[in-house]
Amino acid sequence: MTEPVLPPIGMLAELTHRCPLQCAYCSNPVELLKANREMDTQGWVSLFEQAADLGVLQVHLSGGEPTLRTDLAELIASLARRGVYTNLITAGVGIADGRIEAFADAGLDHIQLSFQGARAATTEKIGNSRGAHEKKLETARRVRKVDLPLTINAPIHRHNMEEVPEFIELALSLGAERLEIANVQYAGWALLNRNALMPEREAVERQVQIVEEAQERLRGIMTIDFVTPDYFAIYPKPCMGGWARDAFMVAPDGTVLPCHAAGTIKSLHFERFGDWSLSRIWHESSAFNAFRGTDWMLEPCRSCERKEIDWGGCRCQAMAIAGDAAATDPACIKSPLHARMGALIKEAVNTKTSDQTPDAFTYRRIGRVAEPII
Amino acid sequence: MIETTRVRTIVSMQSKPVLKRHVRLQYDKVREAWALLSPERVFWPNEVSLDILRLCDGRHSVAQMIALLGDLYGADEAEITPDVTGFLQEWSDKFLVTL
């Protein structure tokens, strides 16, 4: 390494893979872990202590559905004690009375609540869960009641993209400070369901316009963040802000990874917290050092003036589409495989017109299927 | 759907800015720097920003803030007014400060 390794700022803690919803766009790995593989309370608290010592300032508590952990308030309190900023990422379905209040009392800083659709029928279809929409509305009201700041998260794809204007109205009516409209990232279950989820180019362009207009109109009223779709991009995203540069994630069993899809890169080995300390993993893990900085880059990244802007893009997407985790992210126009992205969009759209049941998702379930072969 | 009438707040000399509840200014011992923590981002304010943010306590009006900052930096109040109000408007628009 030519550059010194800086301390991490952010950590995504996937506390559990269990979830009441079965969203086909989920970015969790297809091989989900059962409850008996989850790290216990003491393990997570110890990890959080080490994370704070190492320099982590923000922890995103996610899953699966993190509120299924009965010790969640205790975990939040352990982070709050150390001054770490806590963000709960929840589907907002089935949270028992009094628990949101308990999270707030424990020191929770912020809640991000997902909506699969702006309409009840869409939310129910995407998550394969009846009554989910009404439960989410109720969760949002309870969040506002305890005066916790609220972000509404809307993951968008072919089946709900036309609801973007309604998502904006919904977030406004729920009193959210922030709305995140995120084009689905094709990892995990979303990759498995790619042909069923991929939008058409014209639909993406329409939504970009609607969002830009709303961002202008709602300045100072509500923030709208827009996560652009990789497959329609010219340059790749700086995935995770650069591999192992300032953030990492932890799987339910304590395995520490540079990003949530890194497990798809089979040539890498990932350490588990407990076997190694967090500091040792951050500094010495071969998986973390594999794509750190710019020394690992091949052409066209190596000589590219954007190499410290997008850090070569997403390693997992390079693996999935180029078959080589060290390749340039094919989302980049400079990648020799960039045309493959366009071909995959066409393939998905053709599937839609030829398939009699275009809405047939492989819903997310523990123990359901094996990893997809691309 | 509930009808909402949310409007953008515009900074005035009478505003008494305060950091939002979900925003926290704290000293980071690891990096030996002040960090402003917010839902999705960590900001590293420079010295001037830090002096403004520290006065966002809900007690000082913008006019008082400008007078204090003028003293602190030996600067003309009229000269720094657009900088301070511009900063506060931007931070209000980003939901970091309540005016």
Image (cartoon, coloured by chain):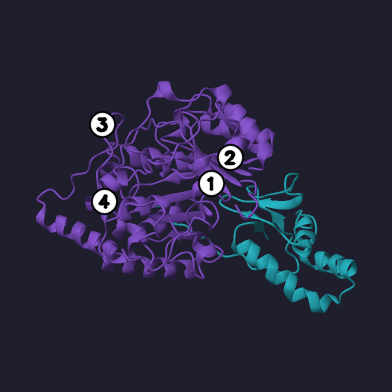
Chain colours: A purple, B cyan
Tag 3 and tag 2 share a subunit = yes
**Residue named by callout 4:** A194
**Residue named by callout 3:** A368
CB-based contact (under 8 Å), mark 2 and mark 4: no
Tell me residue A244's x, y (percent). Answer: 54, 48
Q: Nearer the viewer, mark 1 or mark 4?
A: 1
Q: Using the numbered discs, state the Cα–Cα distance from disc 2 to disc 4 in whole angstroms.
A: 35 Å
Name the N-terminal-most of marks 3 and 2.
2
Question: Circle 3 sits in a helix, a strand or a loop, which is it?
Answer: loop
Q: Which mark is residue A284?
A: 2
Rendered image quadrant of residue A93: top left
Q: Residues within 10 Å of mark 1 (few under 14, many from 20)?
A: some
Tag 4 and tag 3 share a subunit = yes
Between A55 and A135, the residue placed more toward the observer is A55
Name the N-terminal-most of marks 1 and 2.
2
Q: Nearer the viewer, mark 3 or mark 2?
A: 2
Q: Amino acid at mark 4?
A: Arg
Vertical placement of A205 versus B60: above or below?
Answer: below
